[in-house]
């Protein structure tokens, strides 16, 4: 009788353990997906614990289940610690806006597409950036690449104070923009008549935000705004303005700017823009297009499958109260910020990576990364898209801890579609060899890969 009881208990225990093993699988999968590097630590421990459990479970006797019970406790503790670490790190990270996830709420379904009721929302006044200097404030070192590349919208919320970022690359951006406005005019900056009120609204927003945030650079004047560094006095209030309002907006920021307008078909159209430093695309090609066509005409990888629906939801639901950002990165094999000459002349018909020279010396490899923000202007309801490019020689950023290893891994993980889109074939040999060498140097001097997560989180 006692023996039957023991056998039954041992069966029950075996079942419980089997159940635990099965239930641990999603956590192991999650660890594998989200913690590519940490999987050497966390998920490999869990994996081997899981294997040990399997082995033990093949054996019939209760006595031999004791180690399994110990492992069970260990597994439970490891899982608890892992989940609590994930919770903590995601709490400290900027949150993914819910608008990206959920399909509908009342407020967005009740509004008729193409209509907008002006909102009384006013963003909070930003504090001055105390020690900001056009000479010494370096660009924020965004290095937004992961060990594995995922094609996602990748949205995060941003504080209003941080809407527009300026730094000591300002003089170069400002000069490039002024030159291109003079040389290329409406090819780069234009505003459709129906978009004018929104462009004026944007100008007014910049006229109030910039002197608040950067009082050492900008001063509000009766008629507009003064640039204290360049001496420019920009008129933002005359009607008509002396120049296209988007061009004036562009002179005030390091960002490129685009305004999107919802029409009764529910699509968002690009009807105003100052696209002066985009590197790979031209306003004249995309002007007047709806969002989907902007992306499909450029063969953005997996746009239809992975992005389109989420983007439609996101645009429809975006509220004036929200400020959202996303980051991306590219490589280019020339040093031209405004237009990457290696993919062809800006005025040629066919722009393509095919024309780029292959395997150029590493000093010609540049890292280009965009910080894009999205917000809805409260009065007009237009959606403003800002594109701030950060531009550095690869040889400069590869000296930073973890960067060469993480970037090389990210590039190696691109699928064929992303590789083609980003022109990998033209630089992979030279670039990866260089990054691998720099990574090895960092390991040789004792860099601890397992400490990276403690030091920085996305967008790095
Ligand atoms: C939620 C908002 C958006 C998402 C998730 C998104 C996503 C993307 C992605 C994934 C790419 C490929 C390059 C990259 O990785 O960034 C891309 C390219 C591009 N996006 Fe967007 N985008 C958004 C909004 C916009 C808006 C508002 C515009 C309006 C101008 C725009 C214009 C472009 C253009 C012109 C390209 C380059 C296309 C080409 O190569 O021809 N995007 N976008």
Image (cartoon, helix red, strand yellow):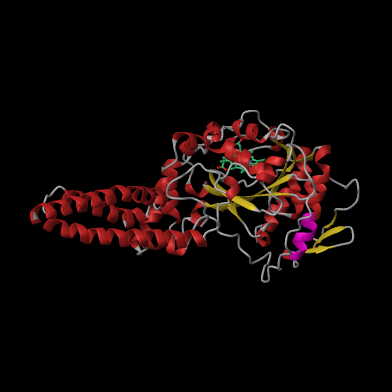
- Nearer to us in this view, 158 or 443: 158
Left of 441 or right of it: where is 276? right
As drawn, which residue projects farthest toward the top? 349
Residue 286 % position (x, y): 69, 34
263 vs 161: above or below: above
Residue 355 % position (x, y): 55, 32
Residue at 43% across, 64% down: 454
* Quarter of the image with the N terminus in it: bottom left
Residue 27 can be seen in this image = yes
- Nearer to us in this view, 391 or 303: 303
Residue 369 can be seen in this image = no
- Nearer to us in this view, 317 or 230: 317
Q: Is residue 203 magenta?
A: no
Residue 271 % position (x, y): 75, 38
Residue 173 % position (x, y): 68, 53
Residue at 88% across, 47% down: 242
Q: Is residue 210 magenta?
A: yes
As drawn, which residue projects farthest toward the front? 1
As drawn, which residue projects farthest toward the right? 239
Left of 231 or right of it: where is 141? left
Quadrant containing ligand 1? top right
Q: Main secondary structure of the magenta part?
A: helix
142 vs 288: above or below: below
Residue at 43% across, 52% down: 406
The stretch in magenta equals 205-212
């Amino acid at each position: 009788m006692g023996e039957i009881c023991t056998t039954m208990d041992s069966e029950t225990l075996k079942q419980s353990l089997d159940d635990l093993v099965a239930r641990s699988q999603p956590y192991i999968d999650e660890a594998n997906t989200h913690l590519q590097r940490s999987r050497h630590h966390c998920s490999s421990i869990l994996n081997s614990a899981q294997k040990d459990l399997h082995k033990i479970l093949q054996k019939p006797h209760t006595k031999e289940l004791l180690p399994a019970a110990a492992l069970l406790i260990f597994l439970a503790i490891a899982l608890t610690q892992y989940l609590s670490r994930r919770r903590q790190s995601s709490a400290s990270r900027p949150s993914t806006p819910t608008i990206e996830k959920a399909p509908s709420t009342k407020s967005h379904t009740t509004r008729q597409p193409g209509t907008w009721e002006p909102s009384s929302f006013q963003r909070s006044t930003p504090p001055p950036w105390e020690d900001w200097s056009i000479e010494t404030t370096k660009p924020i070192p965004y290095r937004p690449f992961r060990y594995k590349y995922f094609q996602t919208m990748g949205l995060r919320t941003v504080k209003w104070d941080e809407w527009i970022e300026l730094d000591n690359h300002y003089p170069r951006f400002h000069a490039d923009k002024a030159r291109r406005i003079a040389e290329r005019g409406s090819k780069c900056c234009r505003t459709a008549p129906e978009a004018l009120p929104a462009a004026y609204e944007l100008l007014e927003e910049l006229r109030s935000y910039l002197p608040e945030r950067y009082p050492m650079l900008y001063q509000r004047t009766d008629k507009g705004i003064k640039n204290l560094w360049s001496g420019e006095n920009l008129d933002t209030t005359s009607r008509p303005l002396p120049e296209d309002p988007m061009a004036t907006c562009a002179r005030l920021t390091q960002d490129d700017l685009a305004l999107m307008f919802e029409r009764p078909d529910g699509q968002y159209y690009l009807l105003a823009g100052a696209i002066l430093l985009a590197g790979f695309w031209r306003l004249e090609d995309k002007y007047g297009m709806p969002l989907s066509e902007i992306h499909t005409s450029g063969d953005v990888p997996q746009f239809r499958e992975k992005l389109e629906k989420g983007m439609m939801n996101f645009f429809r639901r975006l509220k004036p109260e929200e400020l959202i950002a996303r980051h991306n990165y590219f490589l280019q094999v020339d040093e031209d910020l405004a237009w990457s000459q290696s993919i062809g002349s800006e005025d040629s018909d066919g722009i393509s990576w095919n024309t780029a020279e292959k395997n150029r010396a590493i000093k010609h490899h540049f890292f280009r990364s965009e910080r894009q923000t999205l917000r809805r202007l409260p009065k007009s309801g237009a959606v403003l898209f800002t594109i701030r490019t950060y531009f550095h020689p690869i040889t400069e950023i590869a000296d930073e801890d973890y960067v060469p290893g993480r970037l090389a891994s990210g590039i190696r993980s691109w699928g064929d579609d992303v590789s083609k889109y980003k022109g990998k074939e033209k630089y992979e040999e030279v670039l990866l060899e260089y990054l691998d060498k720099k990574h090895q140097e960092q390991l040789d001097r004792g860099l601890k890969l397992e400490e990276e997560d403690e030091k920085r989180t996305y967008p790095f």
